[in-house]
Image: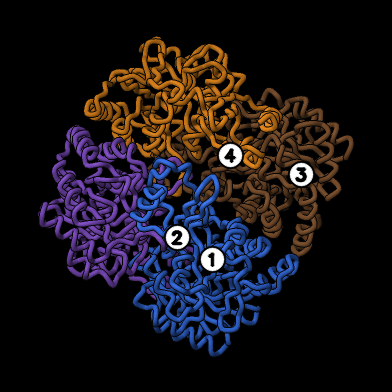
Chain colours: A brown, B blue, C purple, D orange
Amino acid sequence: MDNVIKKIEALGLGIHISKGIERTIIGVIGDESIIRNQPLDALPGVEKVMPILKPYKLASREFKPENSIIDVDGIEIGGNKIAVIAGPCSVESVDSLVEIAAGVQHAGATLLRGGAFKPRTSPYAFQGLGEEGLKYLDVARKKTGLKVITELMDPRETELLEKYADIIQIGARNMQNFRLLMEVVLQKKPVLLKRGMSSTIKELLMSAEYIMSQGNYNVILCERGIRTFEDYTRNTLDLSAIPVIKELSHLPVVVDPSHAVGRWELILPMAKAAIAAGADGLMIEVHNDPGSALCDGAQSLLPKKFAQLMDEVKAVAHAVGREI
Amino acid sequence: MDNVIKKIEALGLGIHISKGIERTIIGVIGDESIIRNQPLDALPGVEKVMPILKPYKLASREFKPENSIIDVDGIEIGGNKIAVIAGPCSVESVDSLVEIAAGVQHAGATLLRGGAFKPRTSPYAFQGLGEEGLKYLDVARKKTGLKVITELMDPRETELLEKYADIIQIGARNMQNFRLLMEVVLQKKPVLLKRGMSSTIKELLMSAEYIMSQGNYNVILCERGIRTFEDYTRNTLDLSAIPVIKELSHLPVVVDPSHAVGRWELILPMAKAAIAAGADGLMIEVHNDPGSALCDGAQSLLPKKFAQLMDEVKAVAHAVGREI
Amino acid sequence: MDNVIKKIEALGLGIHISKGIERTIIGVIGDESIIRNQPLDALPGVEKVMPILKPYKLASREFKPENSIIDVDGIEIGGNKIAVIAGPCSVESVDSLVEIAAGVQHAGATLLRGGAFKPRTSPYAFQGLGEEGLKYLDVARKKTGLKVITELMDPRETELLEKYADIIQIGARNMQNFRLLMEVVLQKKPVLLKRGMSSTIKELLMSAEYIMSQGNYNVILCERGIRTFEDYTRNTLDLSAIPVIKELSHLPVVVDPSHAVGRWELILPMAKAAIAAGADGLMIEVHNDPGSALCDGAQSLLPKKFAQLMDEVKAVAHAVGREI
Amino acid sequence: MDNVIKKIEALGLGIHISKGIERTIIGVIGDESIIRNQPLDALPGVEKVMPILKPYKLASREFKPENSIIDVDGIEIGGNKIAVIAGPCSVESVDSLVEIAAGVQHAGATLLRGGAFKPRTSPYAFQGLGEEGLKYLDVARKKTGLKVITELMDPRETELLEKYADIIQIGARNMQNFRLLMEVVLQKKPVLLKRGMSSTIKELLMSAEYIMSQGNYNVILCERGIRTFEDYTRNTLDLSAIPVIKELSHLPVVVDPSHAVGRWELILPMAKAAIAAGADGLMIEVHNDPGSALCDGAQSLLPKKFAQLMDEVKAVAHAVGREI
C-alpha cells in the first residue's frame, strides 16, 4: 500500500485513506485524467481503480443538495421566481438603450443585457462601444432600476467590468478561456457562464468549477444552443441540458433562445419550452429597430413582441408552479 | 431560350414558362440537385438560376396553408387536442401488454405503442415477437379501445401490418429507406414517420414527400432526438424542430422524449417542454416492470409515473391553449 | 449464484461459468444492452458486471487475427494489392457506361461501379434505370472483364441483384436496414457495406455482424464520410476509421472519397491520404461528361483526371508497401 | 443610388463604386452579417445583393495566389520541405525535456513543442510550470538548435512568450479568443493557430484574418481534429481541411494527429495520411516515459516509435514530391 501511496503522491495528487475490514480505499484528490493514464490497477494489491466523485466538486449536487439562489443586488436567480434578462445584442446609443430598457422593464424584465465589448467572428465587424457602452448601461440602470449584465472578453478589463456590471457574462467562445474564468472573482460578482457551442454539460460544469475553486460561488449557467449538423436553426437549443444540470448541480440555469435559434419567429415557442423544462431564467434579445441593429438583428424581438412573449411565458410558468 | 429549354428537357425535368417584359422565367419542375450540378447560368441569355419552390411540395405549408388533422379511426392528431401514444418498447406478452394498455388508458392515453418487429443494433438481441406480437396488440385494442401503432421494417410485411395497425410507424433508421416509404400507401393508413437521428428537418420533409407523392397524405412527423457530441443523453431532443416544421409544413408533429433522452428521469420535463413548444402529441415508453423489459428498460416509465406526467403535461397544455 | 443464473436465463441469455478460487465468473452471451439495463450488480454476491467480449464477434479481430481477403471472382480485396472500383454514380446508357468502363480499366481499375437502383432524397429525382441498368452493367463486364458492383435497395430484389452483381453494395442510408442485411446471404456473394453517415465504427461492425451471423463472411467495409457541422465539404471523411477498423476487425476497408467530399478537386488528395492511412481499396466516381451526369456530377472525375489519380495513388501505395 | 449609399454608410461600412453600362456595382467593405440582416435588396433600384469577396481577405488565395512560406529563424514552413514539430505535451523537467529534444532531433524534427502554460479542463489538473518551463525550453533550444513553439493563454503574458518562443501557439480552445489573437503581433513572431474543435474552416480563416489584420502575416494554420459523434477517437481528424485550406488560402497547414486521435497506435497512419493529403508539417507528441507524463500520456510516442514514424512519413513525402 505504501508503494501505491508513493506513486500517487509522485503524481502530485492529494490522498485520503479509509480502512475497511476487507479493503482499504485510497481516495485520490485531483485530476482524474492523471489517474486514467496510469496503470495503477496493475500495481500489486490494487483490486480496481474507479472514479468516485465527479470531477467537479463545488459545482456538484453532492456538494450542496439544495438549489443555489444567486442574489443580484436584490434580484434572485434560482428561486421560485423566474428571472428575465432582456435587451439588445450590443449597446449602440444611450437613447436607444434607455428606450429598449424601459420597454423590457414595462413588460416584466428585471435585468438588462447589452454588449459593450463584442466577440465578433470578423475583425472588420463592429466590436462594441467599449467603456462608452458601459456608461450607457449605467445610465439605463439608473433610469429604470434594471440590473445590468454585460460580457467580459479580456482579463485586463475585469476591474472595469466589475465597476459597471451587476452580472459579468462569460460568452460561449470564452467558456474554456481558463485565465478569464480565474479572473472573475475579485468582488465575487455574480457570473453568467454560457455553455460553449460544442461543449458537453460536463465541460460546462468544469468551467463553473474553475470560477468556484477561486472562491466565487455566484455562478449562473446558461444554455444557448450547441452546434450540430442541422442548419435551419443557427444552433440546436439543448433543452434536455436543463434537467440534466438540475440533477448534477445546484447552480441555476438560464436559457438564451435568441442565440440558439437565430430567427425571431422561433424564440417565443422555445422560451415557453425552456420554462416548461425547468429553466430558472430567460435571456432574450430585444431591439426597438431590429432592421438597423448593429448585430443579430434577425434574432431580435421588438418590445411589443417581447411583451407578448412575457404574457405567454407567464402562463407556462404558472402551469409548472413558478412565478415570473 | 430554345437552347435552355432543350437542355432542361434533356435532363428529364418538367418546364413551365412565364414571359415578362424584361425577363422570361423558365420554371423547372423536378429534382433541384440535377439543376445544381448544371452550369445553366453559364448558358447565353441566362441571367441567374434560383430555386423557387421548396423541394417538398405536397408536404409544404405553401401547398396547404391550414394545419392537417389526421384521423386515426376517430382519434384526431394535429387538431387542438393533444394525442398521447404510450406503451412498451416491444410487445412481450399478452398479459403485460394488456396491463400496460389499461394503465396508460386510465391515465389518459388514447393510442397504444408496442413493437412486434424490432430494429436492433445487434443480431443477437431480441428481435420482437413478430405476428404473435401483432395479435397481442389486437387483443389489447379490443380490451381497451386504444388505437394501435406499431413499426414496419420490411416492405414484404406491409399488408400484414396494415391488417393490425391503426398507425404504421416508420422508425428513425428507416427514414430514408425509400422503398419502405413507397409501400405504406396501400390502404392510406396513417403513417408516423420518425426523424432519422442525423437527418435534417428538410430531409424529414422530403421523406414525407415520398409517402405523399404516392397518394397517402396521412403523414404524422415525429421528432425523437438527433445525434450530437453530447453523451450524457442518448440523443439530443431538438425541440426547435417543432416550430420550424410548423412554419414549413402543414403536417402534425409528435415528440418522443423517451428515445431522445434515454433516461426516465428526464422524460417528464422534456414532455412538458415539447407541448410548450407546440407539439401535437407525445409518444412515451411505459412498462409495468422496467427492470425486466426486453428493451429500453432504462427509459421506460412505470404507469404511476406516467399518470403523473399526464397531470403535469395537462397543466402546460392548458397554458398554451390546448386540450389533452 | 443460482439466483443470478436464473435472472440471466430469464432474460433469454446464454451462460458460461468459470469457477475460480476467490471468484466465479459468469459469462453471459447475448445483447449487452439487456444486461446494461439490469441492476445485476445490485444482486447479493455480485461484485461487478463488466463487458468482456465485443458485441460483434465474427467481425472482430479476436475471432480471426489475420486479415480477411475477399475473393471477387478472381479479384482479391484485403490483400497486399489495392483494389480500385470506379465508374459513374448511376448507369445512364449502355454506350456511356461501356466508354467509362473502358476508360477506368485502361487507367488500372479492376471493378466497375454504377447504380441501377438509386436511393434519392427526393421522390422527384431520377431513381435509376432498374433492371435495364443491370443489363448494361453486364454488357460492360463482358466487354471489359471488369467485375461489377451495384447497390441493393429492396429485399425483394436480392435475387435479381445477385444474378448481375459480383459485389452487392449496401448503401449508407441502408446500413441499419437490418432486413436488407439479413437478405444478402443467399449465394454468399461479397457485400460492400457502407458506413452510415452518422454511424459509429462500432455500429458499422454490428451491421457487418448481421450479415456474417447469417453465414455470409464475405463482407467489405466502406468509409464514405460522416455528417458533421463542417459545411464546406458534403461530409467529413473519417480516415482514422481505417486504422481503428484494422485494430478491431479482420475485414477489409475501402474508402469512397467522392461521396465524402462532394467536390472533384478534393478527391485526388483524399484518395492518396486514404491509401497512406492503410485502406485496402478505393471507390471513385468517374463520368465521361460530368456536366450532364444524372446524379453527382459535381463530384465525378473525367477519365483523364482519374488516370492522373491512379498514377499519384500508385506512388503513395508503393511508399506504404502496397501494390495497385 | 444615393439612398442605397447612405443606408450602407449608416451601417458603418466602407464603399467602392464601379459603374457599368447596364448596372452599377456598389462594393461594400465590412462584416457580411450586417448586410445579411438588412433588406437592401428591397430598396428601389437594387437588383440583387451578393457576397463578392470572401469575409477573410488577407488570408485568402485571391489576395495572394502563391503559397506563403513562413520563416522561423531559418526554418521554413510552407515550402517544399515538410516541417516536423515534436516534443512533450507539457514541459516537466529540464532533464526529460533535453532528453526528448535530443531524441526527436536525432530522428529529424527541427522544432520542439512543449507547454509551459497548459489549458486544462479541470482547475485541479497540472497547469504547467509557467516561466520556469519557458526557461527549460530555452535550455533545450541552446543544446539542440531546435526552434521552440509554446502556447500563449493570456494576453498579459505575450511579451514573456515572445521572449522565449520562436513560434507562438494559439490553442484550439482560444481560436476565438479574439483579444488574444490581436495581441500576438508585437514582434511579428510566427503564430501557429489551431482550429477550434468545433470551428468550421471558414471560422479558422477568420481568426487568421484577426491576426493578419493587425499586421502580423506570419500565420501557420493547424488542423487537430473536430468534435463529432464518433467516440472511439478523441476527435475526428478532418484531413479534407488540408486541400480545402490550400484552395481558399495561401497560408501553410500543419497537422496534429496526436490530439485528434488521442491514442498513440493511430498516430503513425494518420501522420502518413496528412502528408499524402498535402500537409506542410506535422506536430507530434513525444515523451520518453508516456506512463509518467503529466498530461496526454496515452497519445505520446516514445522517441524510438517517433523515429519509425519519421522513416515511414519520409517515404510518403517523397511519393508526393516533398522533402522532409
Quarter holding the N terminus of chain A? top left
Mark 1 to mark 2 CA distance (whole Å): 42 Å
Residue at the (38%, 21%) spot, across then down = D67
- Label 2 amino acid? Glu
**Label 4 neighbour load within 10 Å: few <14, some 14-19, many 20+:** few
The answer to whether the residues at label 3 and label 4 have Cβ atoms under 8 Å apart is no
User: Are discs 3 and 4 both within one chain?
Assistant: no
Mark 3, residue position: A86
Relative height, residue C185 to residue C73 (above, below): below
> Which chain is mark 1 on?
B
- Label 3 amino acid? Ala
Residue C287 screen position, x and y as percent: 26, 47
Residue D179, located in which quarter of the rendered image? top right
Q: In front of the other: label 3 or label 4?
A: 4
Of the pair B96 and D282, the residue shown nearer to us: D282
Mark 3 to mark 2 CA distance (whole Å): 53 Å
- Label 1 amino acid? Cys
Residue C250 screen position, x and y as percent: 23, 52
Mark 1, residue position: B222
Q: In front of the other: label 4 or label 1?
A: 4
Relative height, residue B165 to residue C73 (above, below): below
Mark 2, residue position: C47
> Which chain is mark 2 on?
C
**Label 1 neighbour load within 10 Å: few <14, some 14-19, many 20+:** many
User: Relative to residue A319, is residue D232 drawn left or right?
Assistant: left
The image's mark for residue C86 is none
> Which chain is mark 4 on?
D
User: Relative to residue A127, is residue C154 drawn left or right?
Assistant: left
Residue B105 in sight in this render: yes
Which secondary structure lies at badge 4?
Answer: loop
Mark 4, residue position: D47
